[in-house]
Image: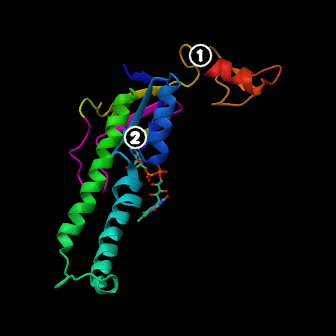
Amino acid sequence: MAESFDIIIIGSGPGGYVTAIRAAQLGFKTAIVERAYLGGICLNWGCIPTKALLRSAEIFHYMQHAKDYGLVAEKVSYDAAAVVKRSRGVSKRLNDGVGFLMKKNKVSVIWGEALIDAPGKVTVKPAISEAPKNSDAPKGALGPGAYEASTSSSPPGRGHGCCRALSRTRNWCGPISKPWSPSACRSRCW
Ligand SMILES: Cc1cc2nc3c(=O)[nH]c(=O)nc-3n(C[C@H](O)[C@H](O)[C@H](O)COP(=O)(O)OP(=O)(O)OC[C@H]3O[C@@H](n4cnc5c(N)ncnc54)[C@H](O)[C@@H]3O)c2cc1C
């Protein structure tokens, strides 16, 4: 039988992993599917590793102009492989950090390529991404298989009033007769 979650998020980039953490914090049984690296483009190829490379370039530039600052730096050179290695290391640290956050917030990580077969039905196949092969699936990650998501339930222990996740005029089951005040929302949700 397909393992069931309240919410299944596909992709663990900054959009996905933050959503997963919040969903779990609101009490939903949450899973996140990832086919390559936790943290997505930003942590693994985009924002973070590029800034790490730029930092090396910046420091190299400063060293070339050391004299301008009253400093002496002779035979300034670079080791491109070491620069890239540092950048990969920074990404790996943050990528591990996302794994830690998933565990801490009790978000199940499902490793593989997700396909939505029908509303609420997700099949996860082995990762076939063009991404660099990742042997870093966090310990305890679930694997390929059939999964179900049912968002019809309200978060456990929060009644039907999680209005911040929806709106002041809609609760978990549908429209409400009278809009809640912000304080009513707070008392029902938090
Ligand atoms: C070179 C570069 C530099 C950047 N620099 C910056 C910056 O400095 N600041 C900034 O704000 N933004 C930057 N960005 C943009 C930033 O990376 C994106 O805005 C951000 O990553 C988008 O996050 P996301 O969660 O929407 O998707 P992504 O980060 O793209 O994550 C999507 C994730 O979903 C996974 N996935 C997709 N489909 C499936 C599937 N079917 N099954 C399982 N997993 C799946 C992918 O493997 C990936 O891990 C940069 C981008 C690049 C390319």
Please provide percent x and percent y for residue 16.
46, 42
**To which quarter of the image does residue 29 belong?**
top left
- Position of residue 51 relative to residue 68, above or below, is above
- Position of residue 98 relative to residue 77, above or below, is above
Please provide percent x and percent y for residue 176.
78, 21
Q: Is mark 2 within 8 Å of ligand 1?
A: yes
Foreground disc of the pair 1, 2: 1
What amino acid is found at the position of numbered circle 2 in the picture?
Ala
Please provide percent x and percent y for residue 69.
33, 82
Q: Quadrant of the N terminus?
A: top left
Left or right relative to 7: residue 72 = left
| Magenta-highlighted residues | 116-138
Dot 1: element: loop
Residue name at image x 41 percent, y 31 percent: 31
Q: 127 or 41, which is in the foreground?
A: 41
Q: Main secondary structure of the magenta part?
A: loop
What amino acid is found at the position of numbered circle 1 in the picture?
Arg
- Residue at numbered disc 2: 114
Residue name at image x 23 percent, y 68 percent: 83
Q: Residue furthest right?
A: 178
- Residue at numbered disc 1: 158
Q: 109 or 127, which is in the foreground?
A: 109
**Cα–Cα gap, marks 1 and 2:** 30 Å
Residue name at image x 80 percent, y 24 percent: 179
Contact, CB < 8 Å: mark 1 with mark 2?
Answer: no
Left or right relative to 187: residue 141 = left
> Can you see residue 37?
no
